[in-house]
Amino acid sequence: MTLAFPNPSRSFDEVRNAVCFIGYDGMFQIRFFIEAEALAKSGVALGGNGRSAETACLSAFDALRTSIQDVAGKVYAHNRRDSYTLTAADFR
């Protein structure tokens, strides 16, 4: 099976300072986190305008969803686990 992202849900994890999203490989659920720092280095503005970190990160994730999911798929293909944390280094 291949990794798919049929559920567009995402959430902000304050403890990890990351956005969490879920992928599926058949019946297996794979949890991904993308660090706020990786979103900040994407060029999408996170700060300012009185927005909370959560709102800014979720908006940046939404703007970059396709490329984030592409990277998640590549990372998953190299080493299949049930949880991953994507960092800025994964997007180079």
Image (tube, rainbow, N blue to C red):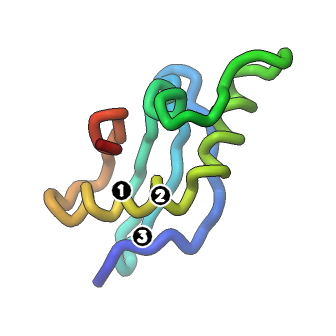
Q: Is residue 51 left or right of residue 28?
A: right
Q: Secondary structure at mark 2?
A: helix
Residue topped by disc 3: 24
Above/below status of 80 relative to 25: above
Q: Amino acid at mark 1?
A: Val
User: How dense is the environment of label 1, judged by Cα within 10 Å: few (below 14), some, or many (20 and up)?
Assistant: some
Q: Amino acid at mark 3?
A: Tyr
The quadrant of the picture occupied by the C terminus is top left
Q: Which mark is residue 83?
A: none
Q: Is residue 58 left or right of residue 74?
A: right
Give the residue drawn at x 51%, y 20%: 15
Give the image quarter of residue 27.
bottom left
The quadrant of the picture occupied by the N terminus is bottom left
Give the residue drawn at x 69%, y 28%: 54
Give the residue drawn at x 32%, y 48%: 83
User: How dense is the environment of label 3, judged by Cα within 10 Å: few (below 14), some, or many (20 and up)?
Assistant: some
> Are discs 2 and 1 less than 8 Å apart at CB?
yes
Residue 19: x %, y % from top left: 55, 38
How far separated are the C-alphas under marks 3 and 2?
17 Å
Q: Which mark is residue 71?
A: 1
Residue topped by disc 2: 67
Most foreground residue, 20 or 42: 42
**1 vs 3, front mark:** 1
**3 vs 2, front mark:** 2
* Furthest residue in direction left, as rendered: 79
Q: Secondary structure at mark 1?
A: helix
Q: Amino acid at mark 2?
A: Ser
